[in-house]
């Protein structure tokens, strides 16, 4: 892993104007890479609170994520967290395919810098980044993919916002908890 490389990337992306999201953002949100992190979570895009504060997953989805990580024995302060795009899309819309493609080199370089034992994709945009656009989350979640294009084991799961949307009895919350449990188990045996 390379702290210097991570820091270099964070500085470089904070000046990025490669797509229109740079016009409407308040802050670039490079992500978090705590020392010793062995897991890299990949979300979708900063929301309003992330855009204001410059840190990933600090809003409602982030609070749910923190709780679920703690439930399975993973401490958020030891987990690296990034997004597929580093700038908030207007009104929190889904990033466009062209925006994802433009931002992808940042993400790919972050994976190299963090060098995690396992990558966890949260939701559809991150799933498409790791496996291509044709895959469905329902078919991909619940197991470890060792041959993914990102060059590390990948666990694909739901985005916490889906868990919030479908509520406590919904499938996404149960699946997200189970899949994070799988990640914790993988780290224990890795
Ligand atoms: N949703 C994401 O995908 N990323 C964040 O940082 C916040 C909410």
Image (tube, rainbow, N blue to C red):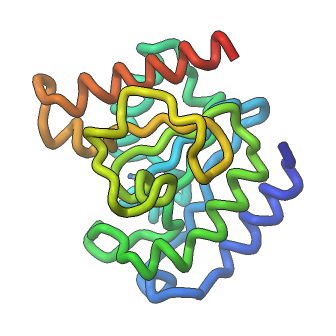
Q: What percent of the width, then of the height, locates residue 23?
A: 46, 88
Residue in view at x 36 percent, y 39 percent: 140
Residue in view at x 63 percent, y 40 percent: 80
Q: Nearer the viewer, residue 96 or 49?
A: 96
Left/right placement of residue 131 relative to residue 117 reads left
Image mark count: 0
Q: What percent of the width, then of the height, locates residue 47?
A: 37, 60
Residue in view at x 69 percent, y 51 percent: 111
Q: Eyeballing the image, is 126 above or below 159?
A: below
Q: Eyeballing the image, is 37 above or below 147?
A: above
* Quarter assignment of residue 46: bottom left
Residue in view at x 44 percent, y 29 percent: 66
Quarter of the figure that contains the C terminus: top right
Left/right placement of residue 40 relative to residue 33 reads left
Q: What percent of the width, then of the height, locates residue 95?
A: 36, 71
Can residue 48 be seen here? no
Left/right placement of residue 94 relative to residue 25 reads left
Can residue 132 be seen here? yes
Left/right placement of residue 69 relative to residue 170 reads right
Q: What percent of the width, then of the height, locates residue 148?
A: 57, 46
Q: Nearer the viewer, residue 125 or 59?
A: 125
Quarter of the figure that contains the N terminus: top right
């Amino acid at each position: 892993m390379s702290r210097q490389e991570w820091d270099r990337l964070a500085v470089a992306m904070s000046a990025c104007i490669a797509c229109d999201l740079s016009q409407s953002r308040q802050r670039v949100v490079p992500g978090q890479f705590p020392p010793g992190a062995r897991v890299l979570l990949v979300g979708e895009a900063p929301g309003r609170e992330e855009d204001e504060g410059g840190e990933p997953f600090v809003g409602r989805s982030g609070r749910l994520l923190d709780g679920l990580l703690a439930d399975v024995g993973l401490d958020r302060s030891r987990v690296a967290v990034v997004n597929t795009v580093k700038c908030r899309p207007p009104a929190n819309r889904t990033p466009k395919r062209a925006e994802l493609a433009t931002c992808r080199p940042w993400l790919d370089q972050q994976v190299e810098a963090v060098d995690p034992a396992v990558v966890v994709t949260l939701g559809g945009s991150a799933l498409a980044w790791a496996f291509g656009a044709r895959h469905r989350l329902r078919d991909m979640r619940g197991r470890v993919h060792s041959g993914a294009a990102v060059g590390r084991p990948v666990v694909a799961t739901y985005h916490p916002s889906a868990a919030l949307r479908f509520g406590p009895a919904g499938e996404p919350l149960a699946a997200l908890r189970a899949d994070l449990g799988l990640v914790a188990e993988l780290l224990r045996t890795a």
